Image (cartoon, rainbow, N blue to C red):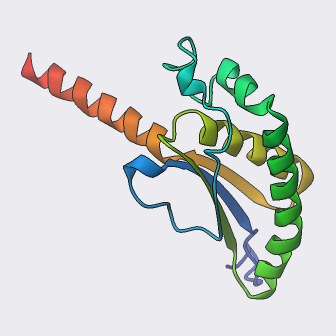
Amino acid sequence: MSDSQGNNAKAPLTVEIVSFGFKYGTPPIANISLDVRFLKNPYWVDELRPLTGLDEPVRKYVLDQGLAQDVLDNLEKLVEHTVPAMLKVKSNSFVIALGCTGGQHRSPAMVEALAERVRSRFSQYQVTSGHRELERMHDDKTASLTAQGSAS
């Protein structure tokens, strides 16, 4: 990559943190992949079931678990030690994938919490977060609404 004066400038390292659901296929390709199904599942709480890990009540339910905070602490340490090593091998991206059963509650909550931590602690990295199953559900709803609109 070159800057505006033609000098070679290294692209900033991108840390991509993604959630997924095991029941919807294989995990995404990642440098680190972690199954977070050991956390208590908001799915089994009636008022939380229709929500996602992006909604505050679900985030609170997941992140108030001591084990969730321990895992986030350890993942943050892992990023601290592994990402610089990736830079040395000339990689400019690092992917962390967190999965739960359906990719709706636990993994999205954990992804957003980890992304916030990495953004605030490692400002030299470009941090993105994504949610495979939530995006798929959104795309399915959009397609359904579009089909209904064109049928009328």
Residue 94: x %, y % from top left: 68, 68
- Residue at the image point whose x is 76% and y is 79% from the top: 86
Q: How many marks?
A: 0
For residue 21, above or below residue 49:
below
- Residue at the image point whose x is 89% and y is 61% from the top: 77
Left or right position of 51 against 85: left
Image quarter (top left, top right, bottom left or bottom right) of the N terminus:
bottom right
Residue found farthest to the top: 47
The picture quadrant where one finds residue 90 is: bottom right
Residue found farthest to the left: 151
Left or right position of 58 against 121: left
Q: 87 or 68, which lies in front?
A: 68
Q: 37 or 86, which lies in front?
A: 37
Asked whether residue 65 is in view, the answer is: yes
The picture quadrant where one finds residue 149 is: top left
Residue 8: x %, y % from top left: 75, 84
Left or right position of 28 against 124: left
Residue 127: x %, y % from top left: 73, 54
Residue found farthest to the bottom: 89
- Residue at the image point whose x is 81% and y is 28% from the top: 64
For residue 21, above or below residue 147:
below
Q: 100 or 56, which lies in front?
A: 100
Residue 134: x %, y % from top left: 47, 37
Asked whether residue 119 is in view, the answer is: no
Image quarter (top left, top right, bottom left or bottom right) of the C terminus:
top left
